[in-house]
Image (tube, coloured by chain):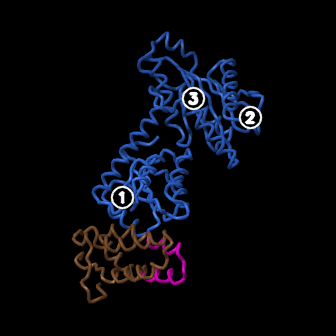
Chain colours: A brown, B blue
Amino acid sequence: MCATTEKPILSEFASDPEMRELIEHFVGVLPERSAAMQERCSQGEWSALRRLAHQMCGAADGYGFPTLGSIAKELQREIDAGNHHQAPALIQQFTNMANRCSAEGSH
Amino acid sequence: MNNDHTHIPRVLVIDDSELVHRLLKVRLQAERLELFGALNSKDGMEMAKTLNPDVILLDIDIDELNGFDVIQKLKEDTETQGIAVIFISASGDTAQKVRALDLGAIDFIGKPFEAVELQARVRSAIRTQGLVRMLAKRAQVDGLTGLWNHTYFDLRLAAECSEARRHTRPLALIMADIDQFKMVNDQFGHLFGDRVLERFSAIFSGGRASDIACRFGGEEFSIILPNTPIREATDVAERYRVLLQNQTWAEHPGVVVTASFGVSDLASVGDTGKGSDMVSAADAALYQAKSAGRNRVVVAEARSANVRVDSGR
């Protein structure tokens, strides 16, 4: 479900019947993952935030959302480099993008 | 021993992302394999030991132990060093790929993985692993009888001794030798001699599933009996003795082939006794069985390998 007025982002695997349920699940957990990242960031829990970013960058590409994966990868890289001040903006970017991810087209 | 045709390959995924586990489950669902998953390195290494999978799909960045630490520990452990490891990682860094392969990984799959490529690489790993295991097994199996060979016997007896001591369980050993086998060969030919060895081995193979029957060499056999008190092992040996004696031979009707047996156990070789001491004790008992007229079971009773004639014709 697209939560913004911007054009929804569909999975690259939307036409793959094998992936239908997986994509629905993935899109379904994105709000919770975005919220978890925001929470870790606000608490300054960088190691836990890095873990979430790492998990997301490994998974997003596989579910057909490479742009989302790229943001997660950048977030992980900035945390590794100690640039924690970059995290809030990247998480916001991730959240905006996650809100546009849609399981439509995979039905 | 595993029948390769009925063996369903096991694949263990060690990755900290539940989303990756779901993805792999679907992408590999059409493959003939059992898929298991661990979300952290500790569980992954424990599952590697208990499941003995054919292949492990291992993430690099897992938790406090990374994939490189995990593969090093797997390769250091004799129980897990033979498992094929494929790294799966979003990192395209060549140095990491080289390090993974140098540490013993057989392949490296980048994330995101193409479904067909992932499937082909896993199939390939399973196929290679099957061949490696078959060769390893063949090196430990006696060609004529299909029983485990002496090399395997030594390794297995040492392992069973450790297990028995760790869990305070009984462990018994039977040594068996076909009586006057040279005469059988000389009188009826080596082909018949081979038939006797095969038949005798088949009797052992048809015994208890938990027992480990080996061809010790020539016409001598050894059977390791885990978790078995010496009295029970003696009964097992007696059953084998009677079974062999009662065999009929179509090529030479009327011929009776017999064997002598020596039985020992871990308790009979004392607190510091090793597998080789069990072999010596059972051998001494077997020698006594031969000296006392053959076709009988003799039990070693104590560290000094005192023997007791237990049964006979």
Left or right of residue A53, residue B236 in this image: right
Query: Is disc 3 in contact with disc 2, using a CB cutoff of under 8 Å?
Result: no
Q: Nearer the viewer, mark 3 or mark 2?
A: 2
Report the disc number at residue B269: 2
Judging from the image, mark 3 belongs to the subunit labelled B
Above or below for A2 versus B167: below
Q: Secondary structure at mark 3?
A: helix
Mark 1 is on which residue type? Gly
Is B49 a magenta residue?
Answer: no
Q: What whole-number distance in Å separates the C-alpha atoms at marks 3 and 2?
A: 27 Å
Does label 2 or label 1 sit earlier along the sequence? 1
Q: Nearer the viewer, mark 1 or mark 3?
A: 1
User: Considering depth in this image, is B128 or B185 the residue closer to the camera?
Assistant: B128
Find disc 1 in the rendering and name its residue. Answer: B110
Find disc 3 in the rendering and name its residue. Answer: B242
* Residue sitting at x 40%, y 79%: A90
Q: Farthest residue to the top: give it.
A: B186
* Residue sitting at x 70%, y 24%: B284
Left or right of residue B167, residue B35 in this image: left
* Residue sitting at x 66%, y 25%: B283
Judging from the image, mark 2 belongs to the subunit labelled B
Q: What whole-number distance in Å separates the C-alpha atoms at marks 1 and 3?
A: 61 Å
Expressed as whole percent of the image width and height from the top left, the position of residue B204 reads: 52, 33
Which stretch is magenta? A34-54
Work out whether residue A12 can be spotted. Answer: yes
Expressed as whole percent of the image width and height from the top left, the position of residue B152 reads: 54, 34
Dominant secondary structure (helix, strand or loop) of the stretch shown in magenta: helix
